[in-house]
Image (cartoon, rainbow, N blue to C red):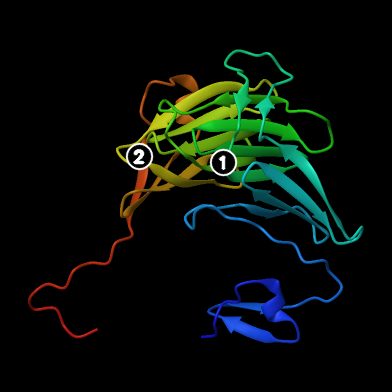
Amino acid sequence: MGVMPRNVHECVGSYRPFGLCSFRHNSDCQSVFQQILMDTLRNLVWATSKHDVYMAQNNSVMHWSSLLQRGTEVLHVAGQVVPKQKTHGARTLSRVQISTMALKDNLMVAGGFRGELIFKYVDKPGVAFCTNAADNKNSVTNAVDVYESPSGATRVTAANNDCTVKFLDAERCSLLSRFTFPWSVNNTSVSPDGKLLAVLGDSSDCVITDAQSGDSDSQRAPGLLVLIGLAPRRARPGDGEP
């Protein structure tokens, strides 16, 4: 296993393996640096094509185009963030530190360290919608996802440290349902058909639920379909050698 380079300059003229990944310097590309506040954050870099990469850095999101050989700021949230859509729940935010993001079909969703949630269309000016999605303002938005529901509508999920996963309608910017768990939710993933939701959090189990069950009754806990233990089983007396 090689040593992970501290910055891009260490990679010049070299090729260093690091675990399952490799780092190679591309002399045709401008160096792009990213400041990551916590090593537990996820989805701070998002590629929408082989030429387009979006990178979250503290109070902004940058778009890097390998074709144009330049970066452009597409979201700046160091000051006041005012939503264009004045729907129910929309509120003005300020000084958002981005903790995670996701992009699909020009819709970028970003989460913040104080439970913030921001909808931004990268091909349009301004912020479409923003709010504080967490019950506790100190609850980090750990992960967001944009997916297509079985009906074809665009949906957004937000996983927070307040032990909830929230489902929102992307077009109406409205809360559809919420699932509550006994631990902080760190990440979620919706199946390609939009019917199942996998949930990971501060637990040794992975929970797979029916992603639609909350639509009819937002107060009802989701029906548990599968509970997968992720923690290794402790050896017991009489167990044979592996």
In the foreground, 205 or 26? 26
| Residue 15 point in image, percent of width and height | 68, 86
Residue depicted at 61% across the width and 46% down the height: 58
Which residue occupies the extreme right position in the image?
Answer: 68
Figure quadrant of residue 242: bottom left
Crowding near pointer 2: few (<14 within 10 Å), some, many (20+)?
few
Q: What element does badge 2 sit on?
A: strand
Q: Which mark is residue 224?
A: 2
Vertical arrangement, residue 103 with respect to residue 21, above or below: above
Residue depicted at 53% across the width and 79% down the height: 19
Residue depicted at 49% across the width and 45% down the height: 188
Vertical arrangement, residue 193 with respect to residue 96, above or below: below
For marks 1 and 2, the one nearer the N-term is: 1
| Residue 44 point in image, percent of width and height | 62, 52
Identify the amino acid type marked 2. Answer: Leu
Q: What element does badge 1 sit on?
A: strand
Residue depicted at 32% across the width and 41% down the height: 183
Vertical arrangement, residue 129 with respect to residue 205, above or below: above
96 vs 65, left or right, is: left
Q: What residue is disc 1 on?
A: 144
Crowding near pointer 1: few (<14 within 10 Å), some, many (20+)?
many
| Residue 75 point in image, percent of width and height | 73, 38
Vertical arrangement, residue 187 with respect to residue 140, above or below: below
Give the label, 1 or 2, closer to the camera: 1
Q: Are marks 1 and 2 in contact (CB under 8 Å)?
A: no
Which residue occupies the extreme left position in the image?
Answer: 237
In the foreground, 181 or 92? 92
Q: Is residue 152 visible?
A: no
Identify the amino acid type marked 1. Answer: Val
